[in-house]
Image (cartoon, grey):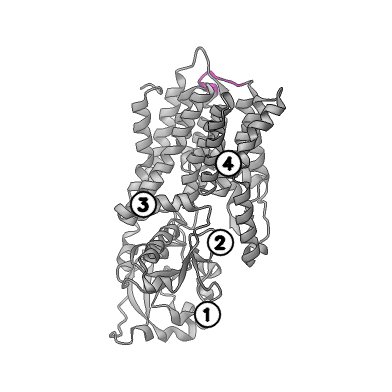
Amino acid sequence: MTLRSNVAFFAALLLAVVPLWLTDYLPLVDLPQHAGQIATLRELLRGNPLFTAEFTINWFTPYLTGYALLFLASSVLPMLAATKVVLSLAVIGVPWMTGVLLRETGGDERLKWLAIPGAYSVGLYWGFIVYIVAVPIALGLVLLTIRFEREPTWRKALGVATYSILLLFCHIMALGYAALLSLTYIAARNLATPKRGAALALPYTAPLPLMAIWMTRVLETDAVVQNAPTVHGGLRAHLVTLFTQLSGFDASTFLINLLVASAVLLGPAIAGLRPSRAPERWLPLVVGLSVYLAFPSFAQNTAFLYERLAVFIAPLWLIAWDRSPRPSRALAGVAIVTLAVWSGITITRFATFGATTSSFDSVLKAAEPGKRLASMPVCNANPEFSNPVLLHFGAWYQALSGGITDMSFAITHPSIVRYRDQQRPRLGEYLAWNPLNFEWARDGGDTYDYYLVCAGEDVAETIFKDRVTSVELVANEGPWWLYRNRERFSGAVPHRPSPKPSD
């Protein structure tokens, strides 16, 4: 098989997204919350009084594009399928755009195969669907920059400015990083003509007024953002994240991570290529990597900041190599073996996780639609993944059953749907991580119809404490326990089924 075959590459891209279609519920941490946002937006637009009394629409958000794509997809497909379509396009987009950039810069287009594992980014595993949608679009800004710098015209300058504004509404971090890479490229190409470089940089200032307005608005109105600390995370943590990012795993055995990451890093040399001497080819990598290493992990009440940037490093690395007049065919063997190992492990992990979600589906369906549900994931992890993949699983009730789930992303400033009353007692982020600290009176226990608990055993007495008699068990399968508020179902016949053995 030749790595220059577009048909073979397209087949490899389809294989890369197979894991996303092996299970109804994906092990991507924040994904249920984003799906819940879109389901709520649809109910608000329909004028559903349950939602209009509780939520308001925040149209001025840098998350708009990703949410719009998910909204459109879920208008013609069930929500679970819609999330997979959007995720699949985002995953395919990273290696696809890497190939386009390699071709545009004169690099060896075969290297795009090595960008496939990294498409399973830190952002993907954390379920940052809005951000991962923005990544290939951000790479598109770099592509426009290359063409604009080569042949600058007013029309192209207007296109760059417009594209930059649109990218702002994809994700503000993706815009900032892509604009930095683009300006670095322009500077590298115009080292001898700095005035020309400065003139070419002007279109990238177009989003600045909107960015300033949004940031000012957030800082003035959101006390949580105002008081949030900044946490760097340390050099070692940055390097570990980069290592796992290159391998396309959130976590796995060290040897497997080392195999895949080494193939990505050494692949160009194995192909007989040499590092480019053209500054526009390697300087974006140096600047991009430096910013990644210097960037904090947490700031303005937003987590996993530098971690999100890691997805750009593999494309930048591959672009920094010159094409060889006598390329080695050994790259094909390295790429095929690497992708076979990576695909096999990824498919197995996702399929194994999918086999454990049938119990969740059964318990979720036991809750009546259109109610209020408190999600209490005492167990929020799965042995196949390093992240707390069950942390927001309760939000699937809001996404699929036309109800309201807490904790909700409606408390966060970038979300398209926000609570009208941010101060009302409810389950928030702290209780999502520490549900055993729930207090009925303090946390609005009487406002919920259902309480969905993930635990290895019945922990009702620990969670509800002196109000344990106010709830009754409706369903239990595996680690999932569904209780309902007796007072809000006063006409129902009380029952407490015998718990099934936990998995």
* Disc 2 versus disc 1: nearer the observer: 2
Q: Is 246 in front, or is 73?
A: 73
Of labels 1 and 3, earlier in sequence is: 3
Residue 484, horizontal then vertical, whole percent: 37, 78
Q: Which residue bears the numbered disc 2? A: 413
Q: Which residue bears the numbered disc 3? A: 72
In the image, is residue 493 above or below residue 315? Answer: below
Q: Which mark is residue 242?
A: 4
Taking the spot 45% from the left edge, 62% from the top edge, the residue there is 392
In the rendered image, residue 83 lying in the magenta stretch gets the answer no
Taking the spot 45% from the left edge, 26% from the top edge, the residue there is 334
Quadrant in which the N terminus is drawn: top left
Q: Are marks 1 and 3 in contact (CB under 8 Å)?
A: no
Label 4 element class: helix
- Left or right of 163 in this view: 373: left
Quadrant in which the C terminus is drawn: bottom left
Q: Which mark is residue 5?
A: none
Instruction: Look at label 2 and name its amino acid.
Output: His
- Left or right of 345 in this view: 205: right
Instruction: Look at label 3 and name its amino acid.
Output: Leu
Label 2 element class: loop
Q: Do the residues labelled 2 and 4 touch (CB within 8 Å)?
A: no
Residue 363, horizontal then vertical, whole percent: 32, 68
Task: Give the crowd class for mark 1: few <14, some 14-19, many >=20 residues within 10 Å.
Answer: some
Of labels 2 and 1, earlier in sequence is: 2
Of labels 2 and 4, earlier in sequence is: 4
